[in-house]
Amino acid sequence: MDTLIPVLNKLQDVFSTMGTAPVQLPQLVVVGSQSAGKSSVLENVVGRDFLPRGNTIVTRRPLVLQLINTNTGIVTGTSAGVNSGGFDEKNYDSKSGASGSGGPEWGEFLHQKGKRYYDFEDIKKEIERETDRLTGSNKGVSDKAIYLKIFSPRVLSLSLVDLPGITKVPVGDQPANIEQLIRDMSLKFIRNPNSIIVAVSPANTDIANSDSLKLAKEVDPNGQRTLGVLTKLDLMDRGTDAMDVLKGKVIPLRLGFVPVVNRSQADINSRKLITEAHKAEQTFFESHPRYRAISHRCGTKFLAQRLNGLLLSHIKKVLPQLKVKIGEMIAETTEQLESYGIPLTGSVTNYGSLLLQLISRFSTNYINALGGRSPDVSLSELYGGARISYVFHQVFAKGLLAIQAFDRLSDRDIRTAIRNATGPRPSLFVPEISFELLVKKQIHRLEGPSLQCVDMVFDELQKVASQCEHLVPQLRRFPKLRDELLECVHELLQAQVKPTKQMISDLIAIELSYVNTNHPDFVGGSRAIHNFNKKIQRLKIEEKKRNPESKADLATLLARDRKANGRGGDAKTGGSITQGIASMLGYPGGGNQTTPPPTERELIETEIIKTLIESYFSIVRQNVTDNVPKSIMFFLVNYTKDRIQSSLVSALYKEENFKTLLSESESISEKRRQQTELLAVLRRSLDIVNEVRDFAV
């Protein structure tokens, strides 16, 4: 058990070099309001006057106090060094050192390694100097701790943190928010779940108003890790006592309360020895009518034993978890440090080899991402080639299916086209030129979505490049190389966009250049007429069933069928703002001219033309749906996959650019330094923890 507290002391020393502890250590944290007697309690525990005193706030930085009993043989301080106070063990007496029982007492500061202070007045002055060095002399506060070790044969081994006293009103040049600053500092320490809160409260005031207990309750509402210390019991009004508080009837704490009696200000001024104060304290409790029965659980000696026992048991409980935590952090830090790589030094060959390696890894990850073989497969969203497939089959294909054969084309447009195609003479048959004119107009509307598909795939390919950057952690070291890689990929893709779009435009132009009415899936003129006749017969039968006396004409039957099937007639569909084919051909008056109602022949011709347009448009739309993705894959996706590595090597592998491309960012250098320091601290910490072989001591 005696080895546990020195282990904690070593861990505190190691972590102090970082300014902050990477893991939460078990510790005793002393909190209390200003003038609650907190400093006197600590001095009584140590048995020496060593803390600065004054009428205003004196403790302005946390003091990590490590008490080390030199009789145990476990002394972690330096065995040699510069002495302060001119120690002469032969002439060592009770006023300046030991009182008859063996051995000297001294203090050591972590910021002055190797220097021993045998004169405790010098320790007091050094605390004041170190505090002023960081916070100035204007009573400001800081959360940067001062580390002090006190070696003595008469102390119980302890490690505790003394925090500045909680104050309400700023004094002198103190900031207006001094109360909040001290409060935040205190919470920073006591929020550590591995800490034991030592809440010091004066007994001569209402315990319900105790600042220290109120603060402790915020982080320990059930009082599981709070030990109460009652001071100034000798100053309570005559006829009153603190027994209800000590029994936990007022504020229940699992660790209970310990009452102590400190030296009065008059005792301090007269330099009354603490050993004499201990005797007076013992006499007070043993002679007091109310405290006599519990005197064995009162006083500074019992408090020191209680703190020692609590700290030992707490360290014993936490140390196995601490070892596991440190081990996990070492693994994480090592992995993080490896991602930053080793600083580059040496010949040009080393730079060139690393550059080729990074280009190769980036290119391989890019190709694998497009081929669905990426090692970093996302489970939350589509990635790489899967997104391109989604663009082809869900976005583009569905977008083309949404384009109907008669969008932005009304029956009046069709009749106008037929009339224009016949010229001055009435035609005997439906003019073929009107069909070609109308179907080409609709086919041309497929070009816009097809070109847009190229842009969407281009964006996805660029996104894949950005995502591949994260699959090569070393690229974070070299921001210039990363930017150049992405720029080269962008240029490679951009160069292929134009030929890809040209191919898409050529596909549409090919469809427009020749209307193949002999296509096996095309309905043809004779079949169109046959289908129309069957449709008319069906409509007449349905009309007779609906109304046997009905004499509806052809226009009425067709209008009713369009309404039933949700298809437009003379009204244009698709939200077009054009005025129709007539206005596009420059017909006088455009679509605004007044036309007579269609004849029965015109209705028949219109229906036949619509059947032909719908059939041929569906064939072409299917061709475009199939050929556009193939063209994009050939001209853009596969081209990029096949040439990305050679293009990157050609553009970047130039000896004069090696050092520029492989220059590290300052942030990476700083992070490597921080991680290296952290790893060294963690490994040293693990070595210290491993000194305790048996956690069941």
Image (spheres, grey):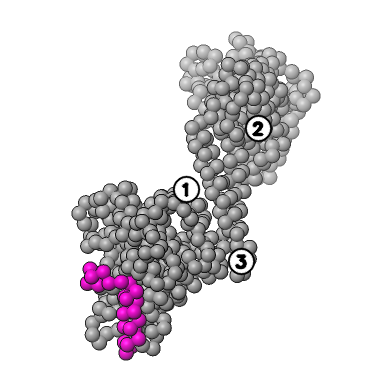
Amino acid, disc 1 = Met
Amino acid, disc 3 = Phe
Residue matched to label 3: 695
Residue 221 in the image, given as x and y percentages of width and height: 42, 69
Choose mark 2 or mark 1, whichever is in front: 1
Are there few (<14), some (14-19), or many (20+) residues within 10 Å of tag 3? some
Q: Which residue is most to the right?
A: 520
Tag 1's secondary structure? loop
Residue matched to label 2: 388
Image mark for residue 55 = none
Amino acid, disc 2 = Ile
Q: Is residue 234 left or right of residue 597?
A: left
Residue 298 in the image, given as x and y percentages of width and height: 38, 80
Are there few (<14), some (14-19), or many (20+) residues within 10 Å of tag 1? few
Where residue 39 sits, quadrant-wise, is bottom left
Q: Disc 3 or 2, which lies upstream in sequence?
A: 2
Q: Is residue 630 above or below residue 308?
A: above
In the rendered image, is residue 592 in sight? yes
Point out the stretch of residues depicted in magenta: 266-290
- Secondary structure character of the magenta stretch overall: helix
In the rendered image, is residue 208 in sight? no
Taking the magenta stretch, the answer to whether it contains residue 325 is no
Q: Which residue is most to the top?
A: 424
Tag 2's secondary structure? helix
Residue matched to label 1: 18
Residue at 51% across, 42% down = 674
Q: Is residue 552 above or below residue 199?
A: above
Taking the magenta stretch, the answer to whether it contains residue 276 is yes
| Whole-number angstrom distance, CA of label 3 to CA of label 2 | 58 Å
Q: Disc 2 or 1, which lies upstream in sequence?
A: 1
